């Protein structure tokens, strides 16, 4: 198998070639490493190579449905025993787990050959991938633009042809945003479908889920078969699928009633290309026999954005405390996250609990909506992949923030409750390009991004489907339908083909 052959196979096909004896796991690993070396200087998707561990894997027998396929994990949550999990932060370079995360163990048990870790923004707090520690990751479709985040390194690695699929996680859109930016498919599972343990019970109060970014729907289905199911000690166990997802995916979903919306839930602008992406998808769905009409859940989008932001206000200070326990200094954390620590320290337990309780209101509204509609269609992004630095605080603004933070004034203002408007602005600035994805996270419902649209400039721009709790099978069935009538697998950026 050569480079060109490698690129035309998804993970399912590569595993079949290995099982048939047509290619060895060692040969596939060399192809993946060669592709990484070819594109790394331009993309910067992989921030830690694990060649020694990977070569040891391919030297021995491998079993499982994905035996021999090269694979990458994200440098956050997905602990690999003996290898630092840095969360993209200088403060976490001493964070070396003693055991594998359950998801990593399941990837290994499936026979995947993990040979590296992918980039993410510090503590996975942004929809772009630009940590000070490792530097920014570029979008293979246009190096001047972001691949999204927080699983931006994973998406860039797949789009650049290093691997056919890569691991990520999604606490506010962190799988769907980069998949949409890079012309790829992803499915974020229902809350509890995949274990986050053993080091963590529920990431971000249960808002985050583990999955993969892939070029084919069947790879995502197979990965979900590998990952799904609870582990001892998990907070709760949800009903398993009626059959393997790779089988359920092939079934006809029947005629579905699908609602759609293109208006930003926080009142910010939506780019005409994002509106066009949904309109064309709605037309395609109608041609497939589905009933499609404009309708959205009855949810206060601004309130949801505030509740989502309060996830950060609790989680980032806790992450920094963990880093400090490992010997880190506070100044090793990036400025904007230090500011989030200050804001988080000022939030009372009452306020945090109040915001978490509001998640129930959103879940009930979504439940009512899915009593009338089978799926909900929106843009994944409100804008095509943005240029690097778009929306960042200016140098002058950062100097002012740094001064206020360094002198302690920011903390005083926060504790006095005088920063509420600032918090509102942070919510709007953080989410204006990605306002559609957080609803799934706070309600625990599954959602996918499907690469059905490219802009006039040739940039990918995915569309999002949400389904009711536990409806991963239906989402996969619709994705397979769309993949068959409007295939995207062979659409790759030029740099991937070399």
Image: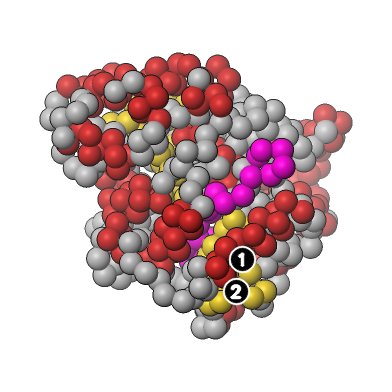
Q: Is residue 438 above or below residue 87?
A: below
Q: Which residues are magenta?
A: 436-459
Residue 349 appears in the picture as rendered: no
Q: Residues within 10 Å of mark 2 (few under 14, many from 20)?
A: many
Q: Which residue is mark 2?
A: 292
- Which quadrant of the rendered structure holds the N terminus? top left
Q: Within the image, what quadrant is residue 252 found in? A: bottom left
Q: How is the image coloured?
A: secondary structure
Q: Which residue is mark 1?
A: 282
In-front residue for pair 369/121: 369
Residue appearing at x 70%, y 63% in the figure: 262
Q: Position of residue 103 (x, y in %)?
A: 32, 46
Task: Check if mark 2's residue and mark 1's residue have beta carbons within 8 Å.
Answer: yes
Q: Position of residue 318 (x, y in %)?
A: 53, 46
In-front residue for pair 256/446: 256
Residue appearing at x 82%, y 29% in the figure: 395
Question: What is the secondary structure assignment of the residue under circle 2?
Answer: strand
Check if residue 389 falls in the magenta segment: no
Q: Is residue 265 left or right of residue 238?
A: right
Task: Give the CA distance from mark 2 to mark 1.
Answer: 6 Å
Q: Is residue 389 left or right of residue 48?
A: right
Comes first in the chain, label 2 or label 1: 1
Q: Is residue 392 above or below residue 132?
A: below
Question: What is the secondary structure assignment of the residue under circle 1?
Answer: helix
Residue appearing at x 17%, y 36% in the figure: 19
């Amino acid at each position: 198998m050569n480079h060109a052959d490698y690129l035309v196979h998804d993970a399912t096909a590569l595993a079949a070639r290995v099982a048939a004896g047509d290619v060895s796991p060692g040969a596939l690993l060399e192809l993946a490493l060669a592709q990484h070396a070819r594109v790394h200087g331009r993309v910067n998707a992989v921030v830690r190579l694990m060649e020694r561990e990977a070569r040891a894997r391919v030297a021995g027998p491998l079993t499982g449905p994905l035996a021999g396929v090269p694979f990458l994990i994200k440098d956050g949550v997905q602990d690999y025993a003996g290898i630092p999990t840095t969360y993209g932060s200088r403060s976490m370079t001493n964070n070396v787990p003693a055991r594998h995360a359950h998801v990593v163990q399941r990837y290994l048990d499936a026979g995947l050959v993990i040979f590296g870790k992918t980039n993410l923004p510090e503590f996975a707090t942004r929809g772009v991938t630009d940590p000070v520690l490792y530097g920014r990751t570029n979008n293979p479709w246009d190096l001047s633009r972001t691949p999204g985040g927080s699983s931006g390194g994973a998406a860039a690695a797949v789009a650049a042809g290093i691997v056919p699929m890569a691991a990520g996680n999604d606490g506010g859109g962190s799988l769907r945003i980069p998949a949409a930016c890079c012309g790829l498919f992803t499915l974020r599972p229902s809350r509890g479908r995949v274990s986050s343990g053993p080091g963590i019970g529920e990431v971000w109060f249960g808002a985050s889920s583990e999955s993969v970014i892939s070029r084919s729907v069947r790879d995502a289905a197979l990965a979900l078969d590998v990952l799904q199911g609870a582990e001892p000690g998990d907070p709760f166990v949800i009903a398993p699928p009626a059959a393997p997802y790779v089988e359920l995916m092939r079934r006809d979903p029947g005629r579905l009633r699908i609602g759609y919306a293109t208006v930003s839930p926080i009142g910010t602008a939506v780019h005409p290309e994002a509106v066009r992406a949904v309109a064309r998808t709605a037309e395609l769905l109608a041609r497939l026999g589905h009933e499609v009409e404009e309708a959205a859940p009855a949810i206060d989008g601004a309130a949801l954005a505030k509740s989502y932001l309060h996830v950060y206000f609790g989680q980032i200070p806790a992450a920094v405390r963990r880093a400090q326990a490992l010997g880190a200094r506070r100044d090793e954390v990036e400025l904007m996250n230090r500011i989030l620590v200050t804001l988080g320290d000022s939030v009372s337990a009452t306020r945090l609990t109040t915001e978490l309780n509001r998640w129930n209101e959103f879940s009930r509204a979504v439940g009512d909506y899915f009593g009338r509609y089978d799926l909900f269609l929106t843009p994944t992004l409100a804008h095509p992949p943005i240029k690097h630095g778009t929306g960042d605080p200016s140098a002058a603004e950062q100097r002012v923030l740094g001064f206020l933070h360094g002198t302690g004034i920011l903390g005083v203002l926060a504790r006095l409750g005088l920063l509420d408007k600032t918090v509102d602005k942070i919510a709007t600035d953080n989410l204006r390009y990605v306002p559609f994805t957080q609803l799934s996270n706070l309600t625990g419902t599954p959602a996918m991004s499907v690469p059905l649209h490219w802009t006039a400039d040739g940039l990918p721009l995915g569309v999002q489907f949400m389904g009711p709790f536990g409806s991963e099978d239906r989402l996969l069935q619709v994705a397979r339908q769309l993949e068959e009538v409007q295939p995207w697998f062979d659409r790759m950026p030029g740099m991937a083909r070399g």
